[in-house]
Amino acid sequence: MRLPTQQEERRLELTILPMVNVVFLLLIFFMLVGRIAPYDELDVAPPLSQGGEIESGRPVRIVVAADGRLLEGGQVLDMTALIVRVADRLRQNPAAQFQLKADAELEASRLIRLMEILRQAGVKQLTLLTESSR
Amino acid sequence: MSRRNYGQREGSAAEENHRRRRSLVILTPLVDVVFILLVFFMLASSFADRRIINMLTPADADRAVWSNSSSALLVRLGRDGSLNLSGEQMSPAQLAQEVAGRSVGGTAYTYLVQPDNDVSLQQVVFVIDLLKSSGARTVSLARRP
């Protein structure tokens, strides 16, 4: 095997260093700017919105897929199971905030029906998750 | 030892060579790990700009309507995207104008958006955006009775 000569090694080192610098910068950029969140088991695309407020706190998130399937805490639930779960959450923390992550294609009247049911279960703070279109 | 004078003596050149190779050996695994981290963060992080819309739960909205019925207005949203404010058919631009006109007065109006069946959530959010950007402070949803 032919080992690289001194000159070649030096050249290699000189070309690799700027690349390492750039890779480090990219790494720091992605670490700071990106947000790492667990994926939801259901594939849901929230509606686009121009307005809206910036998310704050740690709300209880209820995912509603376009076909009406419900997901909370990583489990697909039916309506009665969801109501039990919501009541549990409210017992643990009476001031719990709830957030609906619903698909843009979901029929709006179904979502309103769900909101009514949640209110009957005692939910007072409810927000709808959107994605900024700006 | 300066880098310029390597090769002048046999021994020092070999030493220099050795040192240089050692520094490369240390660099390579580091670059590998940094690359793996970079790929992980590129794939795992999401850049979507998440926003929230505060919702009055429907019963709160009902209360707002019935306690002061004069200040609540119904916006009906048809399947074909048609808008209807308190029984008057209007275009999105007309609705925005109407809402902006009402927002300057002293009365705080509550807008109830009532979508027809088969209207998608995206359309409803579009109307909520329109109302809020025209100056409506309280917007809520209502189901067709």
Image (cartoon, grey):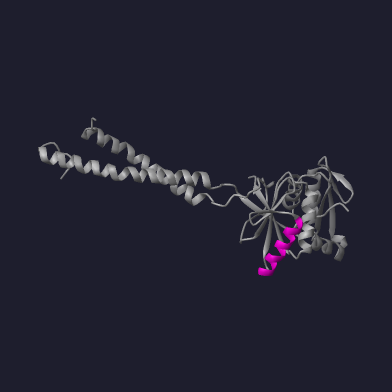
Q: Which residue lies at the image location 42% right of the left edge and 46% below the top edge?
A: A25
Depth check, front residue: B29 or A45: B29
Q: Which residue lies at the image location 79% right of the left edge and 59% below the top edge?
A: A117
Q: How many marks?
A: 0
Secondary structure mostly seen in magenta is helix
Region of the chain picked out in magenta, as a range: A79-92
Q: Quadrant of the N terminus of chain B?
A: top left
The relative height of residue B100 versus residue B65 in the rendered view (above or below) is: above
Picture quadrant where residue B31 is located: top left
In the visual, does B95 lie left or right of A29? right
Across and down, in percent, residue B91 comes to 82, 42
Q: Which residue lies at the image location 81% right of the left edge and 47% below the top edge?
A: B95
In the visual, does A13 lie left or right of A76? left
In the visual, does B50 lie left or right of B103? left
Across and down, in percent, residue A8 comes to 25, 33
Across and down, in percent, residue B28 comes to 33, 42
Determine the residue located farthest toward the top in the rendered image: A2
Please say whether residue A17 is one of the residues in the magenta stretch.
no
Determine the residue located farthest toward the left in the rendered image: B9
Picture quadrant where residue B119 is located: top right
The relative height of residue B12 versus residue B65 in the rendered view (above or below) is: above
The relative height of residue B15 versus residue B75 in the rendered view (above or below) is: above
Q: Is residue A70 visible?
A: yes
Q: Is residue A93 visible?
A: no
